[in-house]
Amino acid sequence: MATRLEDSGFSIVFLIGRQEMPRLVTPDSVIEVFERENLYVSYTSNQENAYLYIDGLDGYASLKLHLDEEGIPCLRPGTQRFSLYSDVNEDYPLIPGDYMIFVKSKGEVCSSLEATLRIRPNNITEDQLDVMRNELNEMVQGLAFDQIRTSPGLKLFEERGVLPPLVLAEFVSLNHMVRKLEVTLEDLTRRPDQYLERQYREIKACANSKQDAKSYRWLLSAQGQRANVDSKSVVHPEVILGVIDYHTYNTPENRMVLGFLHYILSQLEFVLQAIRCTITEEQRAIEARIPYVMVQKSTSHEVRALKAKIVSLESMEREMQKGIFNVRKYMDHPVLKGLTPLSASNQFSPKIQRDWRYKRVFTWWKQLRAQDFKVPSRHDFKVQWKRTDVLYEYWCYMKTIIALEQSGYTPTSGWIYDDSYKVNQEFVFPVLQDDTLVEMVKGPIRLSVLFNEKMPRARRGALRSKRILYMEGTNYKPDIRIDVFDNNVYSGSIIVDAKYRKKLNIWNNDRIEDENRPKNMNTLQNYSNSLKYVEDPAGVSKALRVIALHPSYGPEVEDIEDTNVSLIQLRPKERLSHYSEYLVRIIEG
C-alpha cells in the first residue's frame, strides 16, 4: 500500500480538467493528463524550506515560481493552484512525455517521494505521435540527402570541412543537453558518492593508530616477524600494521560521470571544429564575391546572406566554447580529477537507479551513444521537444510539399532546394523557420509554398515591403500559403492552416451564429475574406480556398456549405492522395 504523503508532512494535489478534479500524488504514482487539459498544482508542507520540483517549470514566467539557491525554478510550500495549463494560456511548455516530480529540502531530495507527471497527446495516440516525429525526421533527412546526391562536385566533411546537416543536428542536441548539465553536475560534485576505503601501513608501535584482525595476522606472518626481528616479544612489537581509513570518490558511479564528460567533450570539440571550418569557408566565399558586388545586385544579396550566416555560426561557436569550458571545469573538479573514466555507459548499478543525478547522467550518455552522430547511418533532427501542435504544423508543411510533388510539381528553389546550398553543401538546420519558401513548377504553373509568413496588413505596407499580397483583419500569419502563378501571372492563393484540434473546435455549424463560437471559425473566415492583391483596385479576396488540416476522425474532405472553407483530415501514416487530388483540383481546376 502506498505511503500517504501527509504522513511525511507533504501534500501535492493536481487539479485536472475544467471540473478541476483533484488527484493526490503518492510515492511512485503516475499522474496522467491529456495535452491542453486544464492542469493546476497545489503544494503544502510543514517544512518551510521543502520545495516542490517538476520538470518543465523553467518554461513558465510566473510570480508564484521561486528560484532556489542554485537558480532552479520550484514551488514553495503554500502554493495554491499554480497553473501548468489553462484555456486562457497561449503557451503550453509541457509537451507529451514524462516529467519527474520530487521534493527537495536543504539540498537533499526527499526519499519518500518520487512521482511522475505523464502528458499524453490529445488528438492522436502516442504511437501516432511517434510516427509523426519519425516521418518528419525521415522526410527532412530524405529530402536533404536527395539534394546532396544531386549536387555536382560533392565534397565530404573531412575533405573540405563544410558543415553538413548531421553536424548541425548534433549541435542542437549537445546545446540542449549542456544547458541542463550544469545544475546536475553542480549538485553531484557538492554531494558526491563516496565510500570509506581502508589502507594499511607499517608504522612504529608507539604511534597512535588503529589495528584490526589483519594487523594481528600480519604480526604473526613472516613479513611481520622480519619487521620486528629486534623486538623482545610479539606482545611488545616495535613495528605494527596500522589501519588508515579515508574517504575516496573512486566509485564506479563517479568514474561513469567522468567517462560521460570525456565523451561529451569529444563531441563538443568535433562540432566546434566543424563550425570553425564552415566560418572559414563562408569568409572565402565572401572574398570571392566582393569584386562583383558593385556590378551585380544579386551578388550583393549573396554577400549579405553569407555575412548573416557567419553571425549565426559565430553564435553557435560561442555556445560550443561555453559548453567545453563548463565540461572541463567539472572534469578538473577535485571529486573527479585523478579518477580513471569508464569507456562505456553499460554499467547500470543499483546506486545509479536510486540517485536521480547519476541516473540523469547515465541517461544522457546512453542517448548520445544511441545517436552516435559520427556514424552517418542515423539522423535525428531533434524535434522531440517541440509541442505537438508545432510538430503538426511542421509535418503538414512537409506533407503539403510531398502532396504537390505527387501531383507532378517539382521543387526548384527555396529552403533545402536552393541552388546556393547545393554549391557548398550548406544547409540551414531543417527546423522550419518563419518565412520558409519553396518554389515548385509544373509546366506554365509556378507555386510559392510559404510557411508562417507574417503578411502586411494594408496595401501601403505591402507596397513598401515590395509584396504583392496583404491580409486585412486580425489574422495575418497563416501556417501555409500557396501562391499560384500561371505564365508568371498571379491567379490566387490557397490558405492552409494546420489545426491540431478536434474537428468541432475548428468548425461547428451549430454555433455559427453564436457569439462564443470557436475562434478558429473566425480565423478561417477572415483568411477567406481578407486576402488582397495590391494590383486589384476592386479589393476582391484572392483566396482560392481556405483549408483547415486536422487529425480527427471523420470524412477525409468536408466542404463547409456557403463558405470558402474546407476541412481535410491529415493523420500520420495514412493516405495522402485525397489531399493531393484536392490541391490539384483547386490549382488547375
Image: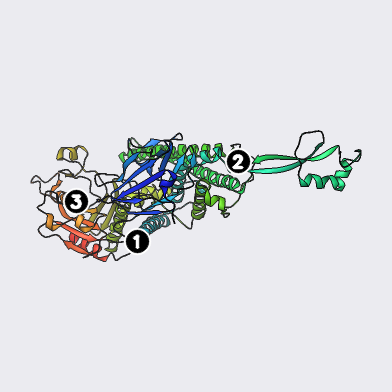
Secondary structure at numbered mark 3: helix
Mark 1 vs mark 2: in front: 2
Q: Residue furthest left?
A: 538
Which residue type does callout 2 highlight? Leu
Distance (Cα) linking label 1 and label 2: 43 Å
Secondary structure at numbered mark 1: helix
Q: State the image coordinates of residue 9 (x, y, percent, origin top left).
A: 42, 43
Residue that mark 2 sits on: 336
Q: Is residue 571 above or below residue 340?
A: below
Could you classify mark 2 by the number of other residues whose Cα lies within 10 Å: few (under 14), some (14-19), or many (20 or more)?
many
Residue that mark 3 sits on: 520
Q: Earlier in the sequence, mark 1 or mark 2?
A: 1
The mark total stands at 3
Q: Earlier in the sequence, mark 1 or mark 3?
A: 1
- Front residue of 245 and 510: 245
Residue that mark 1 sits on: 128
